[in-house]
């Protein structure tokens, strides 16, 4: 048996790069305990650091400028070109400081700058602009701090091929410059890739494609929550596409499965006798789908999934992950003391490494959990833990708190919990003393009928009491809910929003999404029981990524959407914060640190909200002032009407959505149907750049007025310049622009 076998485990882009993810460290800890040589690499943080360098951003700016100049010369634009035109225009409006990423990225790692929310918001804005610039350069790819998407995503093999090229994938250059040399130096026998989120799946194909082309002899394996879900749901006859890139796929849990795969590969590559431990044939590899490339055969594992005994696993081993590189002033270490869900009854849920419902619930013993936390705290100099789990049982949470109190350990932690009556005021105080700083609770709905239908096991009244108990104990409560569960009426949706608004005093943050039908959930398995018909997938969706359905009877009118959205926006407007993964988003490490630093009500502080965008009453220019464009306001001449482009895009996007919803066509098929049917033709226009890279079309007559606003002409002279009949119009326009901070009074005449 070979003794120099090396395994390279990599965590892929694109995912949250404010923190490490624990999947690879858990695998590494297990393999290293078995004596295996393992190298781990977080490509997610390294690749983002590469594309957020000044050199890379400068190249993106040049690409955007060149592409925009090309589109400007066109006589007309089709649907795709219209979208690209707007994306290039948006990217061209970035603040020049965006091209100096070292200035703002360092602000996330510096504690003083991190906890200055005004600067934090400015730095996150610069980061957002940088990613917008990259998206413009690699259109139609959309990359932001929360992930990575394309219009086609994963509906066909053609979509996969498109993502392996340099023109649409901004990470390819990093892979070629950094990853390929790493593989050459490490000489691994196996490369394992973690695909936890949908945003990572296209990078899996891109990385595997490059490695296969450069190192055809290396065995490539992939696993992770999203890939597991994808594989279990896709037709077996379509699975061959995956194995054009991969040699094996681990479904369900991976520690023992990966170790046995390594033992098999060692045996396969050696002329010596097979080891006593480990399987002799791929068909005996539990949790492993193996591709026999010589015989073009996919070999499936035994039907029963292998489930790990958590007490027999070592703690995660982060050695090899750059803990000082993540965009955070201090590490909040992810740790998983449990797996699966102890409730496992929610009708809508399909989560974790399992075929149906949620994975079987298991816990590590309290003694080993505390020992792990002590070890990790000492090894990596951390004091904060994020329990990376589906949900924690109340007894386990209370046991952890009790042990930390008993041992006088001052660790801070957050977790996800289910609302249970056991969370009394007394028990919540115990959790607080035992280091619990924040909990995320799955409320799902504020309506009793919906809660009973999805089998959450509590009432709105119980939810309100438990949330209050946590809050009164000083624990920050983050509420997760969703709308549009099948048969939910407008009134029932409003009850959810009213529950959140009515309990604002005790809810530190909330998120409100929309129901998604997941294969493997009880709703999917028995749709008629939930008022659903016509479950299926769009024609051409080879991988069954997006599950579509229709209610038997429409439960809401189209007009209800405005009422619901208005109520939601009013409630959301009472909280400050940014989008995931930044401060103010639910269940992020940045939010966790802000809770600790400022307290549980920090996001309800009006000072955090900044400029609300509301106009100052009675704000008007003085007749003797000399109006001038505010610095940063930019006006350019364009070749197309933004109004016409936006109208065309809205019209045709609705057509595409309708085709997909009716399961008539995939996105690609629907796109080709309308591609050239609604062209926008050239028409001289002016665009004005407002805040946040937002461009608006400027009517020609307003442009003429703004040309006079140069800081030299008096306001009274400008409004009289076009004659008495236009005086009122010009005065209103200039005062409107003044109230929006586009103009400012440069000085007063004598």
Image (cartoon, helix red, strand yellow):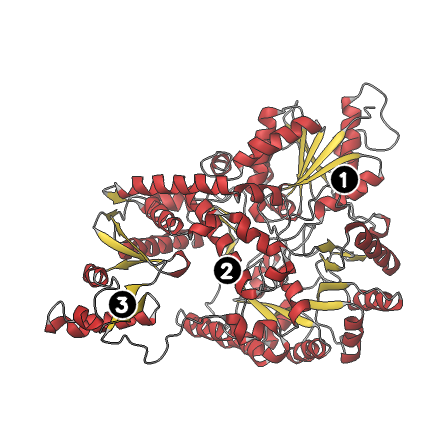
User: Which is more foreground, mark 2 or mark 3?
Assistant: 3
Left or right of 374: which side holds 484? left
Per the image, the residue denoted by label 3 is 627
Q: Is residue 182 visible?
A: yes
The dot on residue 447 is none
Nearer mark to the viewer, of 3 and 1:
3
**Residue at 30%, 41% in the rendered image:** 69
Compute the Cα span from label 1 to label 2: 45 Å
Q: Which corner quadrant of the image does residue 700 belong to? A: bottom left
Residue appearing at x 80%, y 39% in the figure:
31
Q: Secondary structure at mark 1?
A: helix
Q: Disc 3 on helix, strand or loop?
A: strand
Question: Residue at image x 42%, y 49%?
Answer: 664
> Residue 715: x percent and y percent?
22, 71
Disc 3/disc 1 C-alpha distance (Å):
70 Å
Residue situated in front as seen by the camera: 535 or 98: 98
Q: Residue 182 location in percent, x, y?
A: 65, 31
**Relative to 263, residue 702 above or below:** below
Report the front residue among 7 and 229: 7
The percent position of residue 258, horizontal first and vertical second, equals 75, 38
Q: Which residue is mark 2?
A: 122
Q: Which mark is residue 257?
A: 1
Callout 2: helix, strand or loop? helix
């Amino acid at each position: 048996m070979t003794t120099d076998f090396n395994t390279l485990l990599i965590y892929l882009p694109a995912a949250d790069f404010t923190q490490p993810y624990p999947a690879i460290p858990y695998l590494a800890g297990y393999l290293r305990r078995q004596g295996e040589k393992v190298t781990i690499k977080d490509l997610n943080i390294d690749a983002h650091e590469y594309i957020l360098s000044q050199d890379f951003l400068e190249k993106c700016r040049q690409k955007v400028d060149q592409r925009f100049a090309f589109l400007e010369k066109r006589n007309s634009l089709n649907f795709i070109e219209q979208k690209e035109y707007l994306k290039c225009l948006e990217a061209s409006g970035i603040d020049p400081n965006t091209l100096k990423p070292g200035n703002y990225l360092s602000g996330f790692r510096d504690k003083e700058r991190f906890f200055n929310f005004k600067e934090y918001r400015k730095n996150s804005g610069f980061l957002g602009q940088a990613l917008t610039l990259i998206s413009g350069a690699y259109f139609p790819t959309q990359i932001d701090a929360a992930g990575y998407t394309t219009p086609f995503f994963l509906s066909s093999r053609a979509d996969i091929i498109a993502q392996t090229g340099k023109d649409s994938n901004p990470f390819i250059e990093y892979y070629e410059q950094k990853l390929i040399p790493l593989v050459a130096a490490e000489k691994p026998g196996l490369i394992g890739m973690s695909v936890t989120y949908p945003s990572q799946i296209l990078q899996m194909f891109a990385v595997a494609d490059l490695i296969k082309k450069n190192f055809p002899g290396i065995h490539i394996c992939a696993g992770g929550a999203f890939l597991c879900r994808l594989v279990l749901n896709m037709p077996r006859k379509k699975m061959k596409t995956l194995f054009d890139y991969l040699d094996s796929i681990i479904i369900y849990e991976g520690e023992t499965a990966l170790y046995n795969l390594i033992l098999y590969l060692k045996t396969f590559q050696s002329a010596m006798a097979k080891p006593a431990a480990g399987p002799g044939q791929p068909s005996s590899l539990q949790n492993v789908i193996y591709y026999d490339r010589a015989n073009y055969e996919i070999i499936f594992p035994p039907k029963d999934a292998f489930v790990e005994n958590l007490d027999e696993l070592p703690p995660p081993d982060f050695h090899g992950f750059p803990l000082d590189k993540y965009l955070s002033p201090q590490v909040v270490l992810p740790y998983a003391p449990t797996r699966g869900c102890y409730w496992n009854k929610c009708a809508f849920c399909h989560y974790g490494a399992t075929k149906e419902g949620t994975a079987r619930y298991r816990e590590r013993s309290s003694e080993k959990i505390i020992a792990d936390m002590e070890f990790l705290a000492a090894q990596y100099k951390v004091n904060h833990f994020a329990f990376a789990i589906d949900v924690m049982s109340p007894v386990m949470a209370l046991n952890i708190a009790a042990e930390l109190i008993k041992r006088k350990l001052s660790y801070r932690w957050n977790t996800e919990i289910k609302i249970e009556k056991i969370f009394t005021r007394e028990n919540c105080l115990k959790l607080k003393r035992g280091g619990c700083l924040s909990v995320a609770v799955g409320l799902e709905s504020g309506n009793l009928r919906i809660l009973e239908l999805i089998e959450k096991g509590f009432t709105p009244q119980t939810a309100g009491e438990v949330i209050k108990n946590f809050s009164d104990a000083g624990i920050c409560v983050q509420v997760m809910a969703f709308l549009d569960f099948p048969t939910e009426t407008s009134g029932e949706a409003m009850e959810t929003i009213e529950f959140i608004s009515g309990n604002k005093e005790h809810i530190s943050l909330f998120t409100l999404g929309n129901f998604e039908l997941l294969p493997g959930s009880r709703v999917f398995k028995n749709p008629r029981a939930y008022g659903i018909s016509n479950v299926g997938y769009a024609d051409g969706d080879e991988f069954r990524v997006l599950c579509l359905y229709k209610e038997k009877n429409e439960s809401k009118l189209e007009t209800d959407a405005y009422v619901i959205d208005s109520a939601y926006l009013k409630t959301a407007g009472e909280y400050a914060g940014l989008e995931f993964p930044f401060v103010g988003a639910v269940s992020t490490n940045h939010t966790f640190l802000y809770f600790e630093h400022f307290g549980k009500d920090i996001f309800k502080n009006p000072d955090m909200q900044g400029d609300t965008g509301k106009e100052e009453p009675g704000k008007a220019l003085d007749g003797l002032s000399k109006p001038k464009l505010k610095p940063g306001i930019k006006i350019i001449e364009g070749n197309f009407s933004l109004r016409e482009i936006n109208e065309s895009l809205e019209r045709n996007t609705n057509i595409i959505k309708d085709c997909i919803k009716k399961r008539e066509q995939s996105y690609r098929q629907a796109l080709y149907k309308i591609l050239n049917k609604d062209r926008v033709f050239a028409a001289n226009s002016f665009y004005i750049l407002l805040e946040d890279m937002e461009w608006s079309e400027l009517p020609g007559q307003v442009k003429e007025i703004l040309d006079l606003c140069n800081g030299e002409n008096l306001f009274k002279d400008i409004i009289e310049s076009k004659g008495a009949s236009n005086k009122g119009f010009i005065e209103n326009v200039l005062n409107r622009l003044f109230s929006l901070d586009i103009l400012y009074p440069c000085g007063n005449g004598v």
